[in-house]
Amino acid sequence: MAINRREWIQQSLLASAALLVAGTSGAYGCASGLREKRIQGAPLQLNWNENPYGPAESAVKAVNEAMKYANRYPDEYIVKVKDKLSKLHSVKPENLLITAGSTEILSLLGQHVGMQKGEILTAYPTFPTIIQFGEVSGATIKKVDLDKNDRFDFERLSKAITSRTTLVFICNPNNPTSTEVPTEDLKSFCRSVPENVLICVDEAYIEYSNAGTAGSMVSLVNELPNLIICRTFSKTYGLAGLRIGYAVSNAANITALRNRHLGFELSTGWPPLVAVGASLDDQDFVNMCVEKNNEGKQIVYDAYKKWGVDYNPSSTNFIYTRHDRFDKQVVAKMRDRGILITKWPDMYNHIRISIGKPDEMRKFVEVVEDFLV
């Protein structure tokens, strides 16, 4: 007799909790290996997709004030943050899980599939955390190619779903390709996935996208019991160093995740929670970050068009750039000039440039021009 979906996720996440304690060092090592190491005093760090403007002054003030409560567990403020988020997304507080960044959600789900010896299906390249945690805990990974525009190909993904498929992962907008898919296309795909197959949609960069937060799949959470949304405050809100994010799903999935989450929602503390509370009330800051990000992207676009460099128009705070017009050692040579950019091992023909402040992007353009071929 087939086990039902609720029992399935609860039982597998119970096993996953033990693996979190004992078996994830390899996954974290692999994840950190994808990033250029920081250089002390490097003037331009255009490699981790960080928000150069954050956090908001309102968030800084809230964090400083909150330190007087550091001797107390932040249960009360978790409730307040959930209340704000539930109103923002038109869901109930029981549809939300607060985590130390969206990485915790992706790691739990990856291990959930791995402990079942199940299969994670995704287009590739994409953000690898869920894949890494799945692999280290026993999951099979099935990758299909992105389409010719470096976007998720839903026709190929649909055809790739089989009886072995446990979870479909969609990063939209996608990292590292900086592309997004049309909102209605993604909604149609999510509705087409069998209910016994989980869907994880990572929306880390949704505020930067052309569709904006209106393109979120959160509106489908109450309709689709197999849908889990990952969101983070690391990017547009500028809180990467405070480590806070959240999952949105139906109450059964959230309960299962929370009960097997090592922190029981206490892996965050007063500083990130109050920073989120203040940031959610500071939409002007978010709007400024998005506008300045667009200004920084345009500076790079203008240079690329002048030089004949191919790139993906970006729906994020980074640009996915074809490598062939630059020196093969451009990443290392830029590092020598004090500018960090990214090239993951799987990015065979591309480099990724995070967007800094406009003056920083002008400096990037000035230096990288030396390595055109």
Image: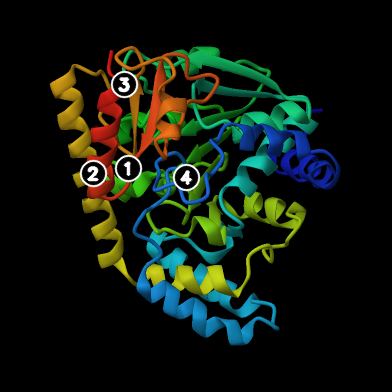
How far is mark 4 from mark 2, CA to CA? 38 Å
How far is mark 3 from mark 2, CA to CA? 20 Å
- Tag 2 or tag 3, which sits nearer the N-term? 2
Amino acid type indicated by mark 3: Phe
Amino acid type indicated by mark 2: Gly
Residue on which the image places disc 4: 223
Binning the other alpha carbons within 10 Å of mark 4 as few (below 14), some (14 to 19) or many (20 upward) gives: few
How far is mark 1 from mark 2, CA to CA? 6 Å
- Looking at the rendered image, the disc whose residue lies closer to the viewer, 3 or 4, is 3
Q: Tell me, for residue 371, which label it has, or none.
A: 3
Amino acid type indicated by mark 1: Ile
Helix, strand or loop at label 2? It is helix
| x and y percentages locating residue 272 in the rendered image | 54, 68
Q: Tell me, for residue 296, which label it has, or none.
A: 2
Which image quadrant for residue 206? Answer: top left
| x and y percentages locating residue 214 in the rendered image | 30, 48
Residue on which the image places disc 1: 355
| x and y percentages locating residue 229 in the rendered image | 51, 45
